[in-house]
Image (cartoon, rainbow, N blue to C red):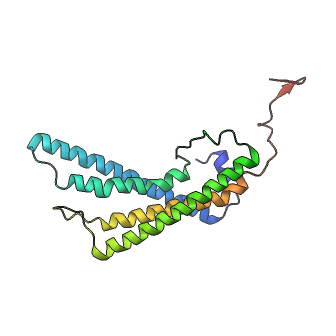
Amino acid sequence: MTTESEAVEGAGEPRWFAVVTAISKVLGIVGGAAVTVMAGQIVVDTLMRFLFNQPAANTIDFVSYWWMPLMAFLGFAAAQSERGHILVGLLTDGLKGRAAAINKIVTLVLVVLILAVLAKYAWDGAARAFDIRQTATGGTSVPIWPVKIAGAVGWSAFLLQAVAELVRAPVSWRPSTPSAEQVPATVEGEAL
């Protein structure tokens, strides 16, 4: 169910905003599934160690090289979409009006630039890993090149989500007239 604020925010926005948000949410679901699989694999490994004195094969490699990177990199865009990142307002809580808007836009521009660099290097690393069909180091042959590609997809989705927020930012700070519900009720000049 869409809340009133979400419906107003999405009104009149370009279609690609909705596509980017949908991609972010799907990636977040996949990242959440990675957490579930990781938890299941750790439980199986622990039970096997306890019951049979034998660990499940490659558990540490899969947790380190698959499940943890998937849950992190695929969850970034979803967290940005839901505005779920932690904000530290120590320096910005006192900003109002135009100063707050400028701060938000400058911050988003910096975030977009940093994410563009991260996405570019993630794709470069994923291409190299794909070319050599990179596997985990050590005695295992767990392939890690697919996760590197997924990580690059995650950074790219995070970048697109930040670009969408940057494009949306100037529109969301235009002054608006308050609705009837936002104006406090008064009786003979006194607030209720």
Asked where in the image residue 170 lies, by quadrant, the reply is bottom right
Vertical comparison of 121 with 59: above or below: below
User: Quadrant of the image for the C terminus?
Assistant: top right
Residue drawn at 10 percent across, 47 percent down: 54
Q: Position of residue 124 (x, y in %)?
A: 41, 72
Q: With 185 as the anchor, is 74 left or right in this view?
A: left
Vertical comparison of 17 with 104: above or below: below
Residue drawn at 16 percent across, 51 percent down: 56
Q: With 189 as the anchor, is 2 left or right in this view?
A: left
Most distant residue in the right direction = 188
Q: Position of residue 26 (x, y in %)?
A: 46, 58
- In this rendered view, identify the residue nearer to me: 175 or 6: 175
Q: Position of residue 174 (x, y in %)?
A: 77, 52
Most distant residue in the bottom direction = 131
Residue drawn at 29 percent across, 50 percent down: 38
Q: Position of residue 82 (x, y in %)?
A: 55, 49
Most distant residue in the front direction = 91
- In this rendered view, identify the residue nearer to me: 148 or 23: 148
Vertical comparison of 18 with 124: above or below: above
Vertical comparison of 124 with 163: above or below: below
Most distant residue in the left direction = 52
